[in-house]
Image (tube, helix red, strand yellow):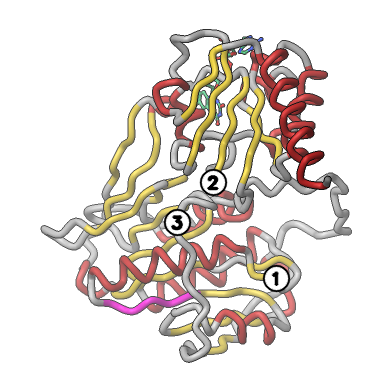
Amino acid sequence: MNRAKVNQNIDLDCYNNVWVIGEQVNGEIHPVTVELLGEGRKLANSIQKDLYVVLAGCNLNSSIEKLQHFGADKIFYLNHPLLKDYSTDAYVKVISELILNRKPEIVLIGATSLGRDLGPRLAARIGTGLTADCTKLEIDPTDGKLLQTRPAFGGNLMATIICPKNRPQMSTVRPGVMEKAKYNENHTSELEVIHPILNESDIKTKLIRKEKFEKKRVNLIDAKIIVSGGRGLKQKEGFRLIEQLAAALKGEVGSSRAAVDSGWIEHSHQVGQTGTTVHPDLYIACGISGAIQHQAGMHESKYIIAINKDPNAPIFDICDYGIVGDLYEVIPALLSSLHEKDFLEFN
Ligand SMILES: Cc1cc2nc3c(=O)[nH]c(=O)nc-3n(C[C@H](O)[C@H](O)[C@H](O)COP(=O)(O)OP(=O)(O)OC[C@H]3O[C@@H](n4cnc5c(N)ncnc54)[C@H](O)[C@@H]3O)c2cc1C
């Protein structure tokens, strides 16, 4: 329903500015919003246009106050009690109406679970294209169009996609990839509060209750040290060794997809194209071959150490230090030398 037609000879010159669709949960701004503001500013500067951010919700005054210091020229605050919690129907309705009215040239959305739900529906409602899960955005210096790059064909090549005939040019962007905008006390974005028309009957789903999923939080995006295990561990219990090494180095535990698919560890630990993109100071890959899809999520680590018993494993092509050996011998040896170091430091 309400799907707009694509490729209707639209006047591209009527579209202006770069927009970020902000994300909040219980009034907390999602970090991806600040990353998109960092990237959005670069794009806006390249085309000499303004950067706007849209935030939908209710009673968001303190979040809005904070958001005003991250470099956007303007904030559209869509304020309505029915926007307090995310619902596809309500958010698509009010944001698509705003886009159709104000005509942004570029719209960026976080590729979070919320953004992956919202982005395609918004694009269909407006009648434009959407490039999902982008890892790189640039402006083509020849015509000012947005070049949207994302992994394709199982991550074996990077595809650059353009949206030549429709506007806005829309992308969802992977969290953790773009550099965050800096907090600037001296900058305050202009604020426009909008009270959209929205009724209960516009929303087909009903939120009955919210349940917090109690699990150990994994923060791979901000981790300085990550120790990851792969299929070379051979069994779930192998992750105890990975956890010990991560704990000794005060790091986080990561994994390859093969380890997740084997049911040895939860997906929240997965690094790579379909997991998390990480930039730690130190990444230790244990029993991981280094498939291109794994590399896509960790190759920008400052230092990479690989432990693998196959000297021809591709991970050795990108690591700074490689240890050819059995991880069940190498990791205990590393642990005992780390404990010895602690012992010397304490004595
Ligand atoms: C669309 C798509 C998306 C994908 N997304 C991801 C992703 O996000 N992340 C990801 O990781 N993968 C992803 N993959 C899967 C990827 O292609 C690989 O299959 C996966 O990364 C392999 O995991 P692995 O390195 O643990 O296992 P393997 O490739 O089987 O490697 C295991 C390694 O362990 C070594 N080894 C074995 N025993 C020992 C030992 N005792 N000591 C030391 N080393 C040992 C072996 O020499 C081998 O190199 C994706 C694939 C596709 C098609």
Q: Mark 2 vs mark 3: give the one in front.
A: 2
Q: Secondary structure at mark 2?
A: loop
Residue where numbered disc 1 is placed: 28
Question: Viewer-nearest of labels 3 and 1?
Answer: 3
Q: Is residue 75 magenta?
A: no
Label number found at residue 214: none
Q: Secondary structure at mark 3?
A: loop
The vertical placement of 143 against 258, above or below, is: below
Q: CA distance from mark 2 to mark 3?
A: 17 Å
Residue 11 falls left or right of residue 170? left
Q: Amino acid at mark 2?
A: Asp
Q: Label 2, on which residue?
A: 281
Residue sitting at x 45%, y 36%: 299
In the displayed orientation, state which residue is furthest to the left. 142
Task: Identify the residue at image location x=77%, y=19%.
Answer: 238
Q: Which residue is more in the foreground, 170 or 61?
A: 61
Residue 140 rendering spot, x and y as whole percentages: 19, 56
Question: Does label 3 or label 1 sit earlier along the sequence?
Answer: 1
The location of residue 266, given as percent across then percent down, is 75, 32
Q: Is residue 263 above or below residue 67?
A: above
Disc 3/disc 1 C-alpha distance (Å): 20 Å
Q: Which mark is residue 178?
A: 3
Is residue 321 something one can see in this rendering? yes
Ligand 1 in which quarter: top right
Q: Residue at x 64, y 58 (%)?
A: 88
Which residue type carries mark 3? Met
